[in-house]
Image (cartoon, rainbow, N blue to C red):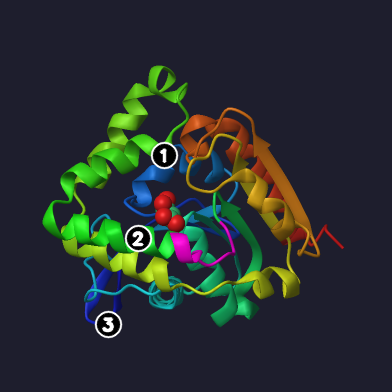
Amino acid sequence: MTAEFKKIKVHYSDTGKGRVMVLLHGFLGSHKIWNEFIKILSKKFRIIAIDLPGHGETHSIGYYHSMELLAQSVKAVLDKVGVRRYVIAGHSMGGYTAMAFAELYPENVSGLCLVHSTSYADSEEKKKERERVIKLVKKEHKQFVAEMITSLFSSESFSKIPAQIENVKRIAASISKQSIISSLEGMKERKSRDLILKFAEYPVLFIIGKKDNIINYETMYSQIGLCKYPTVMMIENSGHMGFYESPKDSATELELFATRCFLKKFE
Ligand code: MLT
C-alpha cells in the first residue's frame, strides 16, 4: 500500500484490526524488520509499519532527510489510512522521527515508544564522525553498510540468530548511496527533543539494550527522569536490535504498554 507525499509514494503495511500502533524502522531498515512484532501485535492491534523515505520501497527525497520531513511522510500515510490517535514506536532513527512527529502533531499521539533511541541531538564528536562517514559513503558505501550492520548486534547474537542477521543485511544492502547520505545528514542535524519527553502528557516506553553499541544505556537514565509517565524495559543481552535479539519479550512489553495507553491507565 502507498500514500502520496511530496511527489513520491510512501510504502507501508497495514495488518490487523483495532486501535492503531505505528512502527517506524531505523537507519538502513525497512518495515520488514518488524515482521515478528507484527505477527504478535496484530492479534490485538492494527499495525501500520512504514518504509521511511529512502528505505524499503520508498524513494528518497533529495539529499537531506530531516527528522521533520520523515515525520511528515508518516503523517501522510496516517492521514491516508484515516486514523487519528495512535501509539507510535520508533527504532533508533525511527525514534528520532517519532519524537519529531510528537512535536509536530501532539494531539495524535496516545503513547510513544523509543526502541533503542534517544532524545539527545548528536554531540560535536558524533557530528564529526558522521561527516567522516558521509565522505566515506560517497566513495564506497557497501563496506560501510556491512560494518554498520555488524555493530548493531551484541556479540552473542551472531551465533544465536544468524538467519535474522542475514535478513537485516539483505534489507540494508538494497538501500542506495543517496538514501544513506540523506539519512546521515538528517540525523546529524537533528535537534535535541528532551522537551518533548518533559512535556509529554502520554506515557513513554523506553526499550534499552544493555549491550547497545550505538545508544549507550547509561545515557538514557536522565531522559527517563524527564518523563511524567515512563516505563523502562532494559534487555540485558541485547544490542541495538531488541526486536530481533529478544523479540517475544519486547513485543509483549510493547503490547502491555499500548493497552495501558489506550485504556488511559497511567495517571
Ligand atoms: C539507527 O539505527 O537508526 C542509527 O544507527 C541511529 C544513529 O546513527 O544515530
Instruction: Give the structural element (helix, strand or loop) at label 3.
Output: loop
Horizontal side of 174 relative to 224 (left or right) equals left
Q: CA distance from mark 1 to mark 2?
A: 16 Å
- Which residue, as the protein is rendered here, is positioned at the far left? 139
Q: Between tags 1 and 3, which lies in front?
A: 1
Q: Amino acid at mark 1?
A: Leu
Horizontal side of 173 relative to 53 (left or right) equals left
Q: What residue sits 42% from the left and 73% below the top?
A: 189
- Callout 1: CB less than 8 Å from ligand 1: yes
Q: Amino acid at mark 3?
A: Lys
Mark 3 surroundings within 10 Å by alpha-carbon count, few (fewer than 14), some (14 through 19), many (20 or more): few
In this view, 47 is above or below 194: above
Q: Is residue 25 visible?
A: no
- The verdict on residue 119 being magenta is yes
The secondary structure making up most of the magenta span is loop
Q: Can you tell which mark lies on residue 6?
A: 3
Where's residue 100, x and y in %?
52, 73
Q: Can you tell which mark lies on residue 205?
A: none
Residue 185 in which image quadrant: bottom left
Instruction: Give the structural element (helix, strand or loop) at label 1.
Output: helix
Of callouts 1 and 2, the N-terminal one: 2
Q: Which residue is mark 2?
A: 130
Q: Which residue is mark 1?
A: 152
| Extent of the magenta region | 118-125
Q: CA distance from mark 1 to mark 3?
A: 31 Å
In this view, 16 is above or below 12: above
Of callouts 3 and 2, the N-terminal one: 3
Q: What residue sits 24% from the left and 46% below the top?
A: 144
Q: What residue sits 63% from the left and 30% below the top?
A: 236
Q: Are marks 3 and 2 in contact (CB under 8 Å)?
A: no
Instruction: Give the structural element (helix, strand or loop) at label 2.
Output: helix
Where's residue 265, x and y in %?
83, 57
